Amino acid sequence: MNGTFAIAPALPRRTLLRRAGQLGAAGAFGMGWTGTARAANNGLVVLVHTQAAGDNGPIDDMIASLRTLAAERKFQARAIYAPDPASFESLLRSLAEAGTEVVITTFFPIAQAVAEVAPKFPKTRFIEIYANKLPAPLPNVRTIQYDGYYGMYLSGLFAAKVSRSGLLGYIGGVDLPGLKADLNALKAGAASANAAVKVDGAFAGSFEDPARGRKIAGRMFAGGIDFIQADAAATDTGVIQAANDGPERMVSGVFRSQFRLGPKTVIGGVLIAFGTSLYQQLTQVLDGRFESGHHVSNLDDGVVDFVLSDLFLAQGPAELVARAKAHWPEIAKAKQAIIDGSLKVPFETTL
């Protein structure tokens, strides 16, 4: 059987649950977990994403990686968009009852539903992408967290070096502890380079509102800020659009796919390679090496990073490109210091 992949659009709750059951019934797979052969040839893998596809960010990245791995390893895969928290628990239960081998979920809002459903279905493996460590470990659940704040520290350090105005901005999606830690790390990195640099932080209230991102970024740029660190998934598109509206404006994104949205404005990005992470974690399951518990990705495993955009280096304003290249060795040195532990980055979740 060749690998198959399908994306299910957002559906009414009742329809979504019925479709979930049909997906399981349609495939030739069993309830048991017997390792590589069954997972690679028969098992159904479902990605339940709580943010919409088409974000030029984490969801698109994960769907692409799941599609790639399904083709390589020839298993059935589905992506289901589940925007309604009221449906989370029922959807996960339906998928598990249908015999789904692996359920991959995205982000914090669905974590409680996983904790409720997983103990009842020990033969289904759950991988939580971007989730906190469970209070009590479950043998069939693996939670993945990302130390993205390390990259934010490097972005702040870099921004303080390349900014002309000494005024920096940060736009996060939702006021969450992890994003507060990102903002604080950005501030710390900037202060380590220049104590006089000022950082203005804001939260858009959504990871899926480009118009809101554009409005906030426009205000920041109008106020003299010339570098904004975006940290809001699909909302970042609006931040980049605001940068494209005027000269000498810089944005650091959070996904490589954002670089093409502003080849002359998106100078780099604090990357969390969600697709790579999904690929790595699911490959372990397919190889019979599933490990429950909690895993944290950071700068030393290639999932978290801070990089320059090749497009900006080729098309950006000559002076800013020169400044970026001149200061990059300092960023690389700081990155290595974080990895080897000689540079401690603060993790502070209150503002």
Image: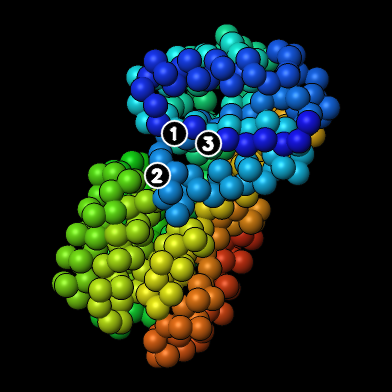
Q: Can residue 293 be seen in this view?
A: no
283 relative position to 37: left or right:
left
Locate residue 118: give its quadrant: top right
Question: Are the residues tagged 2 and 3 within 8 Å (C-beta)?
Answer: no
Left or right of residue 250: residue 103: right
Which of disc 1 and disc 2 is earlier in sequence? Answer: 1
Task: Residue 45: give x, y in percent of width and height.
Answer: 64, 29
Q: How crowded is mark 3: few (under 14 residues within 10 Å), some or many (20 or more)?
A: some
- Disc 2 target residue: 178
Give the mark, 2 or 3, whose residue is nearer the N terminus: 3
Give the CA distance from mark 3 to mark 1: 6 Å
**Which amino acid, mark 3?**
Ile
Residue in the foreground of this view, choosing between 139 and 2: 2
Q: What element carries label 2?
A: helix
Q: Is residue 198 above or below residue 123?
A: below
| Rendering colour mode | rainbow
Mark 3–mark 1 CB contact (< 8 Å)? yes
Q: Position of residue 273 (x, y in %)?
A: 56, 52
Q: What element carries label 3?
A: strand
- The residue at the point 22 percent across, 71 percent down is 221
For the residues carrying marks 2 and 3, which lies nearer the camera in this image? 3
Against 143, residue 34 (above or below) is above
> Measuring 62% from the left and 46% from the top, which residue is drawn there?
65
Identify which residue is drawn at 48% across, 44% down: 59
Q: How far apart are marks 2 and 1 (CA)?
A: 29 Å
Residue assigned mark 3? 7
Which labelled disc corresponds to residue 9? 1
